Amino acid sequence: MKLLENQTAIVTGASRGIGTGIALLLAEHGANVAFTYLSSEVKAKELEAQLQSKGVKAKAYHSDASDYKASEQLVNDVLAEFGKIDILVNNAGITKDGLLMRMSEEQFDMVIKANLKSVFNMTKAIQRPMLKERKGSIINITSVVGIRGNGGQSNYAASKAGIIGFTKSVALELGSRNIRCNAVAPGFIETEMTAALDEKVVAGWREGIPLKRGGTAEDVANTVVFLASGMSSYITGQVIQVCGGMLT
């Protein structure tokens, strides 16, 4: 059963990892997908072709969600190309890890801008067309680190905690217009980034998780599809942890 037939989604930062998994599963469920990338045009074009092969309309946009004007332009471009926007997945983000005593002001500001301001920019830009249609689902990708914190990631934790507060506030503001806003908090998700880590370190992390495995991009994507679909029509302002029981 296709849960998102004839709907249009924007996914930011979709050219790798969790973002790619989300874009692919949205397409499998019938959604047309506009997605952004910043680094690799080759990977973006590969994903665009993959999505189109699923029988949906798809287009890659080179756009920086942390740039306010670029976000406005992206939404206008997607509306012109696709006609409407039903779903926004704010996934774009970076890490600049380090202990607080060694962290520079630039490292802190970069992470807040890329992870948190991007969510403000895109949500602000998408608000008008969704208000006009009196419907929409906004899904923000946060992290378990935003809930419990993590040593060496004070900038990242602050940005992800900020997303949670933003999500809950937007849900309260826009609920009366049938626009829902929820957050997904992944735990340890195994992607190409974690594949480069020492296997013993990864095995240790798996052992500390009640389900005894790392998550997959598809585990996160399944939750996003649920929140994007009518199956979650009475859910807003919530944070769903996809972490194998790491946090309870």
Image (cartoon, rainbow, N blue to C red):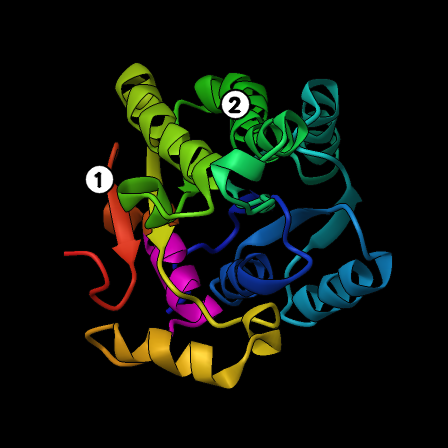
x 56%, y 75%: residue: 197
Hey, what amino acid is under mark 2? Answer: Phe
Q: Nearer the viewer, residue 137 or 220?
A: 220
Q: Residue at x 41, y 43 (%)?
A: 142
Image location (x, y in percent) of residue 70: 75, 25
For residue 79, which quarter of the picture? top right
- Predominant secondary structure in magenta? helix
User: From the viewer's perspective, is residue 189 above or below residue 79?
Assistant: below
The residue that mark 2 highlights is 120
Q: Which mark is residue 162?
A: none
Residue placed furthest toward the front: 101
Residue 190's place in the image compared with 81, above or below, is below
Please report the residue visible at 35 percent of the width from the left and 79 percent of the height from the top.
204
Q: Secondary structure at mark 2?
A: helix
Q: Position of residue 199 (x, y in %)?
A: 50, 84
In the picture, the quarter occupied by the N terminus is bottom left
Q: Which residues are magenta?
A: 214-226
Give the image location of residue 84, x and y in percent: 59, 34
Measure the alpha-carbon separation of dots 2 and 1: 21 Å
Tell me if mark 1 has few (under 14), some (14-19) or many (20+) residues whose alpha carbon lies within 10 angstroms of its own.
few
Residue 136 appears in view: no
- The amino acid pointed to by label 1 is Ile
Tell me the crowding category of disc 2: few under 14, some 14 to 19, or many 20 or more residues within 10 angstroms, Cα based. many
Magenta stretch holds residue 225:
yes
- Is residue 149 magenta-colored? no
Question: Please, which residue is most extreme toward the left here?
Answer: 248
Left or right: 234, with 15 as reference point: left
- Label 1 sits on a secondary structure element that is loop
What residue did someone put label 1 on?
235
